[in-house]
Image (cartoon, rainbow, N blue to C red):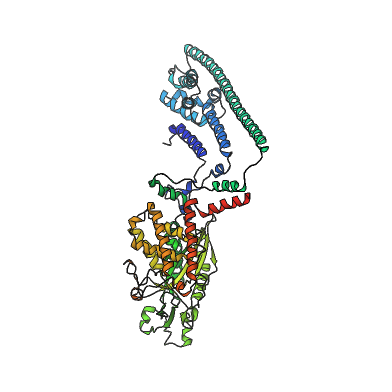
């Protein structure tokens, strides 16, 4: 549908699409959509980013749309003139000035003459003028029937002159006198017709110019009426203000305060109970999109980084790094702090050749806060020399011989025979700085390694200044379970560099993945956690308390009851459970001694056979902690009430600041 015969249709499509884009103030960039051909290779930033609006300035400037529509009318008028008159040449100049147009006419039949005429006109006028006048006037409705016939007569007479008349028969080397006389009379007749045609075209131009001038006068008149109305409205408002200025103010401070309260008064709840969930959903503000959208990109980046690591340190004695596991709230599908999420991945480590790891789990009585460590020992490799190639055994070769190969893990990343988390983190941070130039993503992102003592945390910045923060945590698997000894430590704590606390982050990720498979597509358990994490911010309740309560409720309340319409009921369940745990001074850890843990999660025997661990043990140890916790709970419940009543807390604070400024 893009042949020469479809030229006018495609021009009309382009003009119509441009007007629609101006009306909607939106024209999406071509390389931000899903229909880009596969032969075009785009970077990940183009594929995952939202479409860019080329008409964003029309939304920012309230007067830009009106100016753009005026310019569009100018463009459309120029298009009409081009279709009617061509590129500045009139039809008479085209027919009379170009002698080469008539040169081969005597040697061709009528059909060949028509094709020749079409090609020559196309070269000079882009398309035949008669067709342009016909189709353009049918759409615009601006020419009457006589004017259409006038435009058609030009091309008809020209065709009759060139090919539709009978070719004179040759009589010897010269034409006879009768033939010459007939040709002379016919040429004079054609000249008279062409002169008449030129007069009609000039008359048509004058008529169109007068119509255009009338349209301009009409638009000017309309604008004059508009500004006159604006002036009258301003005069009326000014007179009303003068009248009200002299009226004395009445009322007390109580009336002014009541009027301020009316400002923030909430619209009444819906009469129909079925509309209540929708009403609540409109009041609660979900400010951030799903963080899992960029999880695939993060896993790809870290996977490429570990692939380079395997090829670089193949012959060294650093720990072997396994495939990264996404953990934390970003991979679970929620964002507790409502900021740019940090994508955290746990990289399992295994001992290199000639080494072995021994996990020392610390005090058995304190399962939750174990001060675990990883002891590194050397192994004899004499019997496996064929498997390890040129490697020398660290136990049965002298120091002089061992200088020929790289140092052992005990000499690089250990302190007193224990794996050092801080040394491991610094070692991998230096690797990221040096290996980033080998990454395929280095052409799209700039990397900045952020300061971190026990993890490798770096930030990627793309061309659009969009930032992506990735944190790599190192861990050693405990037996064959989903529990790891992790290099990550809790906030506001200080532990020795050789301490590797237990981490349940992998088990938690598997739990929420299991819930997503078993539950409904639009389940609200993640949104409930998101809202509750925002409510407890700044109180004594950490985010992990909310997460533990929601995990307990997910195993006791069927997934069919976590629909959007059950939002208020589930939020009430969470608040009641939190209040009951504070009063009883007990909240059991989800993975210790809990028979409701799904079978897909593999726990070590010490977790399965132990007694439940109380996360609120500190409330029993401190006699004043319970009153403080109950007071903070009332703060959380008040925040929830205000959130449901007024919407997001940020909006309410802005409203209160505006009211304070007026006072």
The image shows residue 578 at horizontal and vertical percentages of 43, 64
In this rendering, the answer to whether 401 lies above or below 32 is below
Question: Residue 324: in sight, yes or no?
Answer: no
* Observer-nearest of 462 and 616: 616
Residue 575 to residue 384: above or below: above
Say which of 120 and 31 sits in front: 31
Q: Quadrant of the N terminus?
A: top left
Residue 100 percent coordinates (x, y): 52, 27
Q: In this figure, what is the number of numbered marks?
A: 0
Where 323 sits versus 76, above or below?
below
275 to the left or right of 458 = left
Q: In the figure, residue 450 lies in which quadrant?
A: bottom right
Could you tell me residue 362's position as x and y percent?
Answer: 42, 80
Tell me the quarter of the picture where residue 332 sits. bottom left
Could you tell me if residue 139 is visible in this image? Answer: yes
Q: Nearer the viewer, residue 325 or 490?
A: 490
What is the x, y in percent for residue 634?
48, 61
């Amino acid at each position: 549908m893009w042949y020469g015969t479809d030229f006018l249709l495609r021009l009309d499509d382009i003009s119509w699409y441009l007007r629609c884009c101006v009306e909607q103030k939106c024209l999406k960039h071509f390389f931000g959509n899903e229909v880009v051909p596969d032969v075009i290779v785009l970077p990940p930033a183009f594929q995952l980013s939202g479409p860019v609006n080329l008409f964003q300035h029309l939304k920012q400037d309230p007067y830009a749309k009106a100016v753009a529509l005026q310019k569009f009318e100018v463009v459309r008028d120029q298009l009409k003139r081009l279709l009617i008159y061509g590129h500045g040449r009139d039809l008479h100049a085209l027919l009379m000035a170009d002698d080469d147009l008539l040169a081969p006419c005597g040697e061709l039949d009528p059909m060949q003459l028509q094709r020749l005429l079409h090609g020559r006109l196309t070269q000079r006028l882009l398309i035949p003028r008669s067709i342009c006048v016909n189709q353009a006037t049918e759409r615009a409705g601006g020419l009457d029937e006589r004017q259409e016939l006038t435009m058609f007569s030009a091309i008809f007479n020209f065709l009759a002159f060139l090919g539709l008349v009978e070719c004179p028969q040759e009589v010897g080397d010269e034409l006879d006198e009768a033939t010459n006389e007939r040709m002379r009379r016919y040429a004079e007749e054609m000249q008279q017709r062409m002169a008449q045609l030129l007069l009609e075209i000039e008359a048509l131009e004058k008529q169109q110019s007068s119509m255009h001038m009338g349209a301009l006068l009409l638009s000017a008149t309309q604008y004059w009426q508009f500004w006159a109305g604006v002036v009258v409205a301003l005069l009326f408002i000014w007179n009303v203000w003068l009248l009200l200025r002299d009226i004395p103010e009445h009322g007390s401070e109580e009336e002014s305060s009541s009027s301020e309260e009316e400002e923030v008064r909430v619209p009444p709840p819906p009469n129909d109970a079925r509309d209540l969930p929708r009403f609540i959903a409109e009041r609660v503000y979900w400010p951030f999109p799903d963080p899992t959208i960029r999880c695939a990109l993060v896993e790809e980046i870290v996977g490429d980084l570990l692939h380079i690591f395997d090829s670089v340190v193949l012959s060294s004695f650093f720990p072997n790094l396994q495939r990264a596991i996404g953990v934390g709230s970003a991979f679970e599908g929620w964002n507790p702090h409502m900021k740019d999420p940090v994508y955290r991945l746990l990289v399992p480590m295994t001992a290199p050749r000639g080494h072995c790891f021994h996990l020392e789990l610390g005090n058995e009585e304190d399962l939750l806060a174990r001060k675990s460590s990883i002891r590194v020992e050397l192994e004899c490799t004499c019997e496996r020399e064929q498997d390890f190639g040129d490697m020398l055994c660290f136990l049965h070769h002298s120091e002089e011989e061992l200088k020929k190969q790289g140092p052992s893990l005990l000499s690089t990343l250990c302190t007193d025979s224990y794996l050092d988390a801080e040394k491991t983190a610094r070692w991998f941070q230096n690797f990221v700085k040096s290996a980033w130039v080998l990454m395929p993503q280095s052409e799209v992102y700039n990397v900045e390694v952020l300061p971190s003592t026990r993890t490798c945390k770096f930030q990627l910045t793309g061309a659009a200044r969009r930032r992506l923060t990735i944190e790599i945590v190192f861990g050693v698997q405990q037996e064959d379970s989903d529990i790891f000894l992790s290099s990550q430590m809790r906030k506001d704590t200080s532990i020795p560099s050789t301490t590797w606390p237990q981490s349940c982050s992998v088990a938690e990720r598997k739990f929420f993945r299991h819930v997503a498979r078993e539950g409904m597509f639009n389940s609200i358990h993640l949104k409930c956690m998101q809202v509750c994490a925002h409510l407890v911010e700044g109180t004594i309740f950490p985010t992990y308390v909310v997460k533990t309560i929601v995990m307990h409720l997910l195993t006791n309340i069927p997934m069919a009851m976590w629909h959007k319409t059950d939002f208020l009921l589930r939020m009430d369940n969470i608040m009641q459970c939190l209040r009951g745990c504070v009063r009883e001074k007990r909240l059991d850890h989800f993975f210790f001694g809990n028979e409701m843990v799904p079978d897909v999660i593999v726990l070590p025997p010490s977790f399965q056979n132990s007694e439940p661990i109380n996360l609120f043990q500190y409330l029993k140890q401190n006699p004043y902690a319970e009153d403080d916790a109950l007071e903070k709970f009332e703060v959380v419940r008040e925040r929830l009430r205000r959130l449901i009543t007024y919407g997001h807390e940020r909006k309410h604070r802005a409203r209160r600041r505006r009211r304070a400024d007026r006072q």
